[in-house]
Amino acid sequence: MLLLRGFCAHFIDFYRQTDRGRFCSPREAICPRRHVGGSPIETTNRLGDARVPLLNRLLRRIRKSEPPVRLEDCEFAYPYLNWVQRCVGHGSYGRLRRHYTWGVIQAAFVAAELKLPRITVVEFGVAGGNGLIALDMLPERLAAFFPTRIDVVGFDAGAGLPPPQDHRDHPNLWSAGDYRMDADALRKRLSHARLILGDVSETVPAFLASRPAPVGFVAFDLDYYSSTAYALRLLAADASLLLPRVYCYFDDILGFTFNDYGGERLAIREFNQQHADRKISPIYGLRHQVDERFRDDAWLDQMHLAHVFDHPLYGHPDGLVRHGRKPLNATE
Ligand SMILES: C[S@@+](CC[C@H](N)C(=O)[O-])C[C@H]1O[C@@H](n2cnc3c(N)ncnc32)[C@H](O)[C@@H]1O
C-alpha cells in the first residue's frame, strides 16, 4: 500500500511538471545558446530520473484510454489531429518534440488526404542529434494513423557552425565551431533517418537531384541567415518534390537579437521577394487549433506554411475542413 502511495505521489508530481511544459522544448527552442560547445545526445531524461520512461508509458496508456476522436464526426480536422498527437505522446521529457510532432502529423494527414504514398520530413541543423532522433521516432508511431510513409532526413555540416559571414549571421550570438556533432554516435541511435553531412549549399541541390518523396515538414535550425538562405532553396524545388503546403518550423526568430534585417527572418523575406509562386507565411492564430496544453507554447509563433501556389494539388481539398456545412441551429 505504501509502495503504491509512493508511486502515485511520484506520478502526480511528474505529470504536473511535464504537462505544464516546464521541461518541454518550446522554452529551449528559443534559446540560441542551448547547445553551445556541443550538443550531446540526451541519454537520460531531463528529470534525471530512471522512473520516467515507465511513467511516460503509463501516461501514454492513460491518454490512449480516452475515447477515440473520429474524423467523420469532426467539422474540422483539428480535434482529430490533436487526438492523434495525444496518442503519439507529447514527449514531455524531451525525446519527442511537440512542435516537430505537430508539423509531421499535419503533413502526414494532408499527404494521406491527397493519396500520396510517401513524404519526406527534414531537419536543417542537427548538432548533437536530439531533434533528428525525435523526428526519427515519428514514422513508426504515426503508421497506425496514416497510410503515408515518412522518410526522415537531417542536414548538418558535421563540424559545427561555419564562420559567420557578416552581421546578418548574428555573430554576437554564435561562433564558428559551435554545435559540433559526433556523427558515429548519432548514426548508431537512428533507426531509419538519413544524416546528410556537408554544407547545405552543396548538399541541398544534390538531395533534390536524387528526387526524394515530396517534402511535407521542415525544421529550420541553422542559426545563420546565410545558411538558411541556402536551405530555403529546398522550397524552390520542382513542385513534384513538395507538398502543396509545407509545414515549416523556424527555430531562431523569437527574442534575443533576432530582427527583420538578419537571420532566418531576413532569409524568409528574401525568399518571398524572389518567388512569385512560393510564399512562406506564419500560421496565424494556431493557438486556437492546437491541443489546449500547447496554447502558451512559443513554437506556435515559430510555425509557418510554405505555400506552393504553382503546385498542381494546391487547390485540391486537403481534408482540414470536413463537412463544409453549417445548418441553422434548432430553435429552443
Ligand atoms: C543550433 S544547431 C542545431 C540544433 C538541433 N536542431 C537541435 O535542436 O538539437 C545548428 C546547426 O546548424 C549547422 N549548420 C549551420 N550552417 C550550416 C551550413 N551552412 N551547412 C550545414 N550545416 C550548417 C551547424 O553545424 C549546427 O550543428
Image: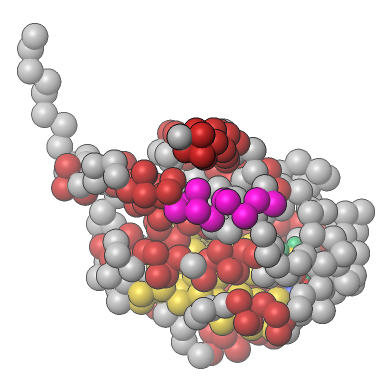
Q: Residue at x 49, y 64 (%)?
A: 217
**Foreground pick, 219 / 80:** 80
| Percent position of residue 272, x then y | 59, 58
238 vs 262, left or right, is left
Q: Residue furthest front?
A: 1
Give the quadrant of residue 179: bottom right
Q: Residue at x 57, y 34 (%)?
A: 13
Please identify the quadrant where the C terminus is shown: top left
Query: How many callouts does the rendering have?
Result: 0
Give the quadrant of residue 16: top right
Q: Is residue 1 magenta?
A: no
Give the quadrant of residue 255: top right
Q: Is residue 128 above or below residue 1?
A: below
One can see residue 269 in this view? no
**Foreground pick, 191 / 161:** 191
| Percent position of residue 24, x then y | 62, 46
Q: How is the image coloured?
A: secondary structure
Quarter of image, ligand 1: bottom right
One can see residue 175 in this view? yes
Q: Main secondary structure of the magenta part?
A: helix
**Foreground pick, 156 / 247:** 156
The residues colored magenta run 48-57
| Percent position of residue 185, x then y | 70, 80
Please identify the quadrant where the N terminus is shown: top left
Q: Is residue 56 magenta?
A: yes
Q: Residue at x 45, y 65 (%)?
A: 138
| Percent position of residue 266, x then y | 72, 55
Q: Is residue 111 above or below residue 76?
A: below
